[in-house]
């Protein structure tokens, strides 16, 4: 069985999420949001557009986090992440991009808002399919990460030269 045919766990380690988020300057969070809405559209046969829910992410993040929470609670898992705080933190930290150097670099920490949700989901996915391994990084993902981290380091170096 090749990697293309092999089934992998839905577990997404926090370090991968953080690296992809930083390397993509936060756009990976939108991709994750899109995948979440696509999952619920298929699972619950929802009449929603994952694209528009992602495009308008600040307005729909709370309902996505709540859907994950409801799904986990229905399966008997204890979930206690503060959705409103996570959304407000994400919105606040993303506004730092309009601040002066070097404060705007804080925006790269926006992935922190997703960690409690991701951790809850990872416990669920791991227990649901413990026999499945986490999907390894592909060559394209590694190239993307290296390029993104280099851009981030260049931006960090340029911001350390602020006047």
Image (tube, grey):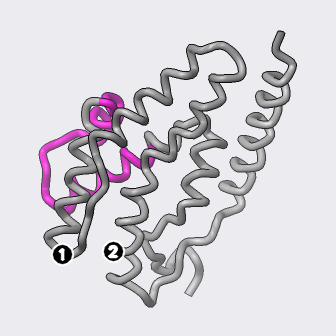
14 vs 79, left or right, is right
Helix, strand or loop at disc 1? loop
Q: Is the magenta stretch mostly helix, strand or loop?
A: helix
- In this orientation, which residue lies closer to the viewer: 151 or 49? 151
- In this orientation, which residue lies closer to the viewer: 130 or 159? 159
Q: In which quarter of the image is residue 63?
A: top left
- The 10 Å Cα crowd at callout 1, few under 14, some 14 to 19, many 20 or more, is few
135 vs 123, left or right, is right
User: Which quadrant does the C terminus fall into?
Assistant: top right
Tag on residue 124? 2
Percent across and percent down for residue 160 are 83, 24
Tag on residue 25? none
Asked whether 71 falls inside the magenta stretch, the response is no
Q: How many labels does the image show?
A: 2
Residue at the (14%, 70%) spot, across then down: 74
- In this orientation, which residue lies closer to the viewer: 150 or 80? 80
- The 10 Å Cα crowd at callout 2, few under 14, some 14 to 19, many 20 or more, is some
Percent across and percent down for residue 99 are 59, 15
Helix, strand or loop at disc 2? helix
User: Is 134 placed above or below 63 here?
Assistant: below
Q: Name the residue under label 1.
A: 75
Percent across and percent down for residue 80 are 27, 60
User: Do labels 2 and 1 touch, CB within 8 Å?
Assistant: yes
Question: Magenta region: which residues?
Answer: 31-58
Real-space Cα separation, disc 2 to disc 1, in angstroms: 9 Å
């Amino acid at each position: 069985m090749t990697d293309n045919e092999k089934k992998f766990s839905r577990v997404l380690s926090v370090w991968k999420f953080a690296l992809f988020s930083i390397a993509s300057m936060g756009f990976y969070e939108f991709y994750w949001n899109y995948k979440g809405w696509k999952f619920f559209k298929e699972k619950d046969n929802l009449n929603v557009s994952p694209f528009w829910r992602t495009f308008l992410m600040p307005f729909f993040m709370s309902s996505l986090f709540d859907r994950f929470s409801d799904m986990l609670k229905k399966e008997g898992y204890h979930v206690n992440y503060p959705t409103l705080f996570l959304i407000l933190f994400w919105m606040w930290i993303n506004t730092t991009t309009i601040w002066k150097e070097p404060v705007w670099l804080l925006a790269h920490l926006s992935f922190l808002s997703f960690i409690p949700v991701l951790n809850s989901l990872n416990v669920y996915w791991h227990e649901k399919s413990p026999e499945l391994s986490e999907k390894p990084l592909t060559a394209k993902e590694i190239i993307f990460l290296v390029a993104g981290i280099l851009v981030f380091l260049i931006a960090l170096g340029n911001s350390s030269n602020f006047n």
